């Protein structure tokens, strides 16, 4: 299994590279588990930059990002937060699910995302000018709607936005094969099952099954679990706890992952 591998969607690698060299921050949008994190890690390796990942949540304060004074052995000393460390070392700072963070915590990013490329550490009375190698990358899932959580348009307009989605079926099956070791035919059946559920998604109103869950199902199949059972625990069960919906999903899975095919697969 090669967990370093990234299969490009379209022109995102080239665009990310150009943005990096032009010192422009990037926003990745797309559904959960479509490859955003994998892409940033890949770009970190391609550009020779460390990736500092910060998972955003609604308790995240600007001090969690930039740092704070801490008492150590009777002394009060300033300790850089992950954002400050990333700026100082010229890393790629990746704010995952940035929409989860409160707007006031994100205000600290403004001066880093425009021509100033500067972090103002008011409390430490320090101004940090970002080196050329520093890059800010954020991600969020616009389809996951909650009226309370939306990024401000003014914030969104500070970024070059690369819209990501699930790979086309053949490419997604390639990823699943590479990530799990299952046969291509199994990967195609799992993708077929997910594609049908994704198309029905508007009616169901749930987060559609991601490439991540398909990889997980494929790994169970590679470990000897039936396709349908693997799909049940990795793809269907996490989607919905509603019995009627679940029955519908199970029918879709059964139509794609036929027991005969599973049998041939597992006895090979
Ligand atoms: N383009 C891709 N190339 C390689 N692996 C991928 C790709 N897209 C998704 N994956 C697989 O799906 C998993 C989830 O992707 P991830 O980057 O964590 O999603 P996200 O950050 O968008 O939620 C990865 O661990 C990898 O196995
Ligand atoms: Mg991620």
Image (tube, rainbow, N blue to C red):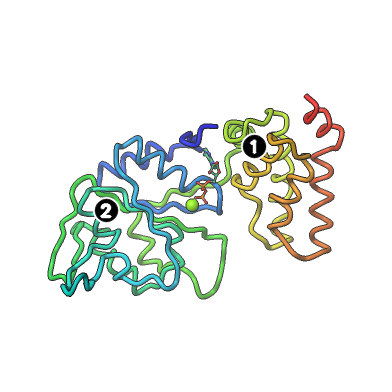
| Local SS, label 2 | helix
Q: Is residue 10 visible?
A: yes
| Local SS, label 1 | helix
Is 161 situated left or right of 130 in this image?
right
Which residue is found at the position 26% from the left and 41% from the top? 21
Which residue is found at the position 35% from the left and 37% from the top? 45
Q: Where is residue 225 drawn, in percent x and y?
A: 75, 39
Quarter residue 229 falls in? top right
Read off the residue under disc 1.
169
Read off the residue under disc 2.
86
Q: Where is residue 86 drawn, in percent x and y?
A: 26, 53
Vertical placement of residue 1 versus 44, above or below: above
Q: Nearer the viewer, residue 66 or 12?
A: 66
Mark 2 to mark 1 CA distance (whole Å):
36 Å
Q: Where is residue 168 drawn, in percent x and y?
A: 61, 38
Is 124 situated left or right of 262 in this image?
left
State whether label 1 is within 8 Å of ligand 1.
no
Q: Disc 2 or disc 1, which is closer to the eye?
A: 2
Residue 70: mark: none
Q: Nearer the viewer, residue 45 or 162?
A: 45
Which residue is found at the position 29% from the left and 64% from the top? 109
Name which of mark 2 and mark 1 comes first in the sequence: 2
Q: Is residue 137 visible?
A: no
Is 139 situated left or right of 47 in this image?
right
Mark 1 Cα shell of 10 Å, populated few (<14), some (14-19), many (≥20): some
Mark 2 Cα shell of 10 Å, populated few (<14), some (14-19), many (≥20): many
Vertical placement of residue 151 versus 166, above or below: below
Where the C terminus falls, by quadrant?
top right
């Amino acid at each position: 299994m090669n967990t370093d591998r990234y299969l490009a969607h379209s022109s995102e690698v080239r665009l990310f590279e150009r943005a990096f060299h032009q010192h422009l921050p990037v926003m990745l949008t797309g559904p959960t588990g479509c490859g955003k994190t994998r892409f940033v890690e890949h770009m970190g390796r391609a550009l020779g930059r460390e990736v500092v990942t910060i998972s955003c949540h609604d308790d995240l304060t600007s001090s969690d990002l930039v740092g704070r004074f801490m008492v150590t052995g009777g002394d009060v000393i300033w300790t850089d937060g992950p954002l400050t460390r990333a700026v100082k070392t010229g890393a790629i700072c990746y704010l995952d699910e940035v929409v989860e963070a409160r707007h006031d915590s994100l205000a600290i990013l403004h001066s880093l995302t425009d021509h100033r490329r500067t972090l103002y550490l008011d409390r430490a009375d320090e101004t940090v000018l970002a080196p050329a190698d520093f890059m800010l990358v954020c991600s969020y899932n616009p389809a996951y709607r909650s009226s309370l959580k939306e990024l401000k348009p003014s914030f969104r307009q500070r970024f070059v936005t690369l819209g990501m989605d699930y790979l086309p079926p053949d490419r997604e099956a390639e990823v699943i094969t590479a990530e799990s070791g299952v046969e291509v035919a199994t990967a195609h059946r799992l993708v077929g099952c997910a594609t049908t559920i994704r198309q029905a998604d508007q009616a169901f109103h749930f987060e559609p099954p991601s490439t991540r869950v398909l990889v997980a199902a494929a790994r169970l199949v590679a470990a000897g679990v039936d396709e349908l059972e693997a799909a049940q625990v990795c793809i269907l069960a996490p989607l919905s706890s509603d019995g009627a919906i679940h029955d519908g999903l199970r029918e879709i899975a059964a139509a794609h992952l036929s027991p005969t095919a599973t049998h041939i697969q597992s006895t090979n």
